[in-house]
């Protein structure tokens, strides 16, 4: 095929035009939309990445940007902060507390941003989205991927089969590579090992090698099918969180529920509120010492009926906890971080509209939204003053007061 000069020119012109329109529409999109909607800006970078007009319930609309330069062009109504990326020396000051709403999104463990353990820092914000049931956009079930995981038998190994594996496997699995924690989980497990066999494959208290195929990068493959089948053969798994907060329940717990290990759990003090059934895990806080725990585990090893009482969600496909059932049906967004962010943006958007019509009530985030008391050791069930994380908890309390004063007086 041959093209004439005119045809070539025409094609060039069309391509340039298309490119121009494309670039212009993107610029338009990102920087200069002027819809008159209230403007929400994610001050922190990294998550989520957005520039769009959102439409929420009751037809309420806002423009949301993750580009803070937008404040040069528009009046910002609210700043949102993704807690893990907050730098307290880089905040949008002055605070202008009566005019601008601040929202805090925080899904991580307290070791991440210690300043947010304390009420003065929390109280800089008006609304929160956290794992706490008392948050404005709560997501206590963030690590439960789906409802069906609880009762699914995809990975489940029946008790008789698990018993036959005991020739080669310990009854209990420990799999952790972060060994110095606020909850001193290694100290607990080291003690428990004196009374009962535990297979430990991670860097912490390691006494067994993973099969070659999992060895290189197991931390990034914890949810692979094959790996889940590998861990499902264990009767019990040690599930100790690295921090203690109300409603902070991680994949350690939910993965055990999913594959059908009985978790031996330490972490969220109110964990029972999220059990599928009232015996879905054995709580370290209920046994005064590792030795008494080992006595109970041994009893279950000798009696399959007693053991299976802890696995009703698998053996009977039963879920008797109404709080859990309601939570999942009323807040299905919570297993997806971007959905949570979207819900949060809409809440803030609604508040900005209420503000326009002077219907907005004053609201300040408090300790209940992110309730992580001074960490307690799993071994002694008491605060250990020589634990580094306890030291940091105290230190950041003073930092939090300094930050509060600086921001409020700005
Ligand atoms: C645990 O659940 C079972 C069955 O749903 C029930 O019969 C029992 O009373 C419950 N026990 C406690 C301590 O709540
Ligand atoms: C937002 O929080 C600030 C800081 O605590 C507070 O002074 C202000 O009254 C709050 N504003 C609204 C509208 O809730």
Image (spheres, helix red, strand yellow):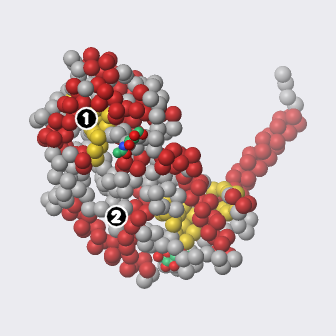
Which residue in the rendered view is the most extreme toward the left? 194
**Residue plotted at (44% across, 29% down):** 316
Q: Mark 2 points at which residue?
A: 117
**Residue plotted at (38% across, 80% down):** 405
**Residue plotted at (73% across, 69% down):** 36
Disc 1 to disc 2, C-alpha distance:
28 Å
Vertical order, 182 against 192 (above or below): below
The quarter of the rendered structure image containing the N terminus is top right
Please tell me whether mark 2 sits on a helix, a strand or a loop. helix
Exactly how many numbered labels are in the figure? 2
**Residue plotted at (31% across, 18% down):** 160
- Left or right, residue 75 beside residue 142: right
Q: Looking at this view, is 204 or 303 the one in front?
A: 303
- Left or right, residue 271 beside residue 34: left
Q: Name the residue under label 1.
A: 174
- Left or right, residue 253 beside residue 333: left
Please tell me whether mark 1 sits on a helix, a strand or a loop. strand
Vertical order, 375 against 164 (above or below): below
x, y (%) of residue 369?
43, 63
């Amino acid at each position: 095929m041959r093209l004439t000069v005119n045809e070539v020119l025409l094609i060039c012109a069309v391509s340039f035009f298309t490119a121009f329109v494309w670039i212009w529409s993107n610029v338009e999109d990102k920087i200069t939309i002027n819809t008159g909607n209230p403007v929400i800006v994610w001050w922190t970078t990294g998550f989520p990445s957005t520039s769009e007009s959102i439409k929420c319930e009751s037809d309420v609309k806002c423009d949301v940007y993750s580009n803070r330069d937008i404040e040069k062009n528009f009046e910002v109504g609210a700043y949102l902060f993704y807690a893990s990326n907050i730098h307290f020396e880089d905040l949008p000051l002055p605070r202008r507390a009566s005019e601008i709403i601040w929202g805090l999104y925080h899904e991580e463990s307290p070791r991440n941003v210690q300043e947010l353990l304390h009420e003065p820092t929390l109280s800089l914000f008006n609304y929160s989205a956290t794992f706490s049931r008392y948050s404005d956009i709560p997501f206590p079930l963030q690590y439960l991927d789906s409802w069906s995981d609880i009762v699914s038998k995809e990975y489940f190994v029946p008790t008789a089969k698990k018993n036959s594996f005991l020739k080669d496997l310990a009854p209990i699995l420990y799999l952790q590579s972060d060994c110095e924690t606020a909850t001193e989980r290694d100290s607990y497990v080291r003690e428990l090992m004196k009374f009962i066999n535990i297979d430990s494959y991670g860097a912490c208290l390691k006494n067994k090698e993973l099969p070659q195929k999992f060895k290189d990068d197991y931390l990034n493959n914890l949810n692979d099918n094959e790996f889940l089948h590998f861990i499902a053969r264990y009767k019990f798994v040690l599930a100790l969180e690295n921090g203690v907060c109300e409603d902070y329940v991680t994949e350690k717990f939910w993965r055990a529920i999913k594959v059908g290990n009985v978790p031996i759990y330490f972490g969220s003090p109110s964990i029972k509120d999220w059990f599928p059934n009232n015996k879905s895990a054995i709580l370290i806080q209920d046994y005064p010492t590792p030795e008494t725990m080992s006595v109970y585990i041994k009893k279950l090893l000798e009696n399959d009926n007693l053991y299976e009482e802890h696995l009703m969600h698998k053996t009977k496909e039963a879920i008797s906890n109404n709080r859990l059932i309601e939570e999942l049906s009323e807040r299905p967004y919570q297993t997806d971080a971007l959905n949570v962010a979207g819900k949060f943006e809409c809440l803030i958007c609604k508040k900005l509209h209420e503000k326009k019509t002077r219907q907005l009530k004053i609201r300040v985030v408090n300790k209940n939204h992110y309730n992580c008391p001074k960490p307690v050791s799993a071994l002694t069930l008491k605060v250990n003053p020589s634990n580094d994380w306890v030291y940091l908890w105290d230190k950041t309390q003073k930092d939090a007061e300094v930050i509060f004063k600086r921001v409020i007086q700005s």
